[in-house]
Image (spheres, helix red, strand yellow):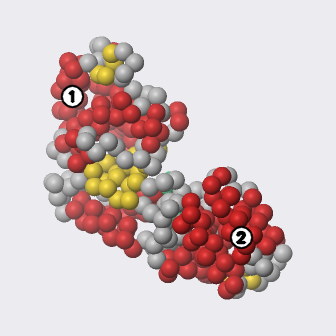
Amino acid sequence: MAQKTDFPLNPYIWSEPIVNERLFINRTWELSKIDGFLERLLAHDKTLLSLFLIGPRKRGKTTLLQTTMRRLAEKGIPYAYVTLTRDHAFLSPYELVGDVFLKQTMIQFGIWKRYLYKIWDTLRRVKKAGGGFSGSGGEIEVEAKQKLLDDFSPRFRHVAKKIGGKGYPVVIFLDEIQYYQDNQPQSVPILLSFLRTLIEVERSFIFVMAGTSDFINSEPIASNFQRLPVGPYDQDEDAEEAVEKPLEVYNEVNGTKIKFDSVSKKVIIESVKSVTDEVDKSDGYNPFLINYLCHHAFDDCIKKKKKTVVLTRENALHAASNLQIEEYRIALIKKLSESMP
Ligand SMILES: Nc1ncnc2c1ncn2[C@@H]1O[C@H](COP(=O)(O)OP(=O)(O)O)[C@@H](O)[C@H]1O
Ligand SMILES: [Mg+2]
């Protein structure tokens, strides 16, 4: 059972991915795909493809990655999580793989640091030896690239064997990959050919990526990735669960008996459906918007020391007008102004 101390004061988290397993709303379809992927991993399936979660921001991609990592940890499969930021957008593919992917993986692998360091060092040496990029197009010179790959692969194979103790590939999670794609589309083929080398070296590494835009499909490595589109919740039950479950868990942890007002629940679900339809152009319920509205209604309830969570006209419009994402803000204000009593 969750401990009170590590449980959030407000169970409706909207500003970060959900890491607490008990607050995770089950996404049956997405999880069945992820489970299929994990099964192949556990069965040492050599034809296993890497996985690529694609979807607009705030859809639950990172939350699904977190859930996948928990499952890997339970099964003793080694993994590392790396997230890109704006700072990584203009790095060369060398720097991205060496200074970011490998360096962060090193930090997370503790005892394997030494081995990963060797790979990183190889990358650096090749770079120093002239394996740079010609012109501004980010094209890597053919010879330098070959040298890098020749030099790189044996080391990588060695390290991969050491890390994947039980013979499982090491799963490297790369989140927010669009920072790179959107800013340097011309370097993506080089980056991908690196990653493909890593995947192909005795299938020692597997990548799970998440991002908002797809790679160019014609890239050879595109066929190494199994795509998993992450949409809004597509079931009515998921939307209901998203409103009810966090409160149930909160009550259980805190020994309280707070209820969710049924009219408020209906208004939240209906307005989120309408905004998802209008802004996201998809049929379903945006997970972030449900949590966002529930969060504010819950806050109000706690502040006023009430026993029922109610979405009032006041707290609803206050929440909506503070929404940072413009399209959602406009659509939500409009919808709530119509539907709130
Ligand atoms: N499975 C889920 N269970 C509960 N809340 C979720 C879930 N997926 C997404 N959310 C909500 O959506 C928000 C954004 O999720 P996140 O994983 O950060 O999306 P992305 O990585 O696609 O931007 C979370 O803060 C949470 O409010
Ligand atoms: Mg994310």
Q: Position of residue 115 (x, y in %)?
A: 30, 35
What residue is shown at x 41% (from left), y 51% (from top)? 210
State the mark number for residue 200: none
* Whether residue 62 is situated above or below residue 32 in the rendered picture: above
Three-letter code for the amino acid on which mark 2 is drawn: Leu
The earlier-in-sequence mark between 2 and 1 is: 1
- Which residue bears the numbered disc 2? 336
Q: Horizontal placement of 310 versus 135: left or right?
A: right
In depth, the one of 29 and 208 nearer the eye is: 29
Q: Amino acid at mark 1?
A: Leu
Q: Which mark is residue 149?
A: 1
289 displayed left or right of 154: right
The residue located at (46%, 46%) in the rendering is 176
Does the numbered disc 1 mark a residue whose Cβ is under 8 Å from ligand 2?
Answer: no
Kindly tell me whether residue 275 is visible in this rendering. yes
Of tags 2 and 1, which is closer to the observer? 2
Q: Position of residue 286 (x, y in %)?
A: 54, 66
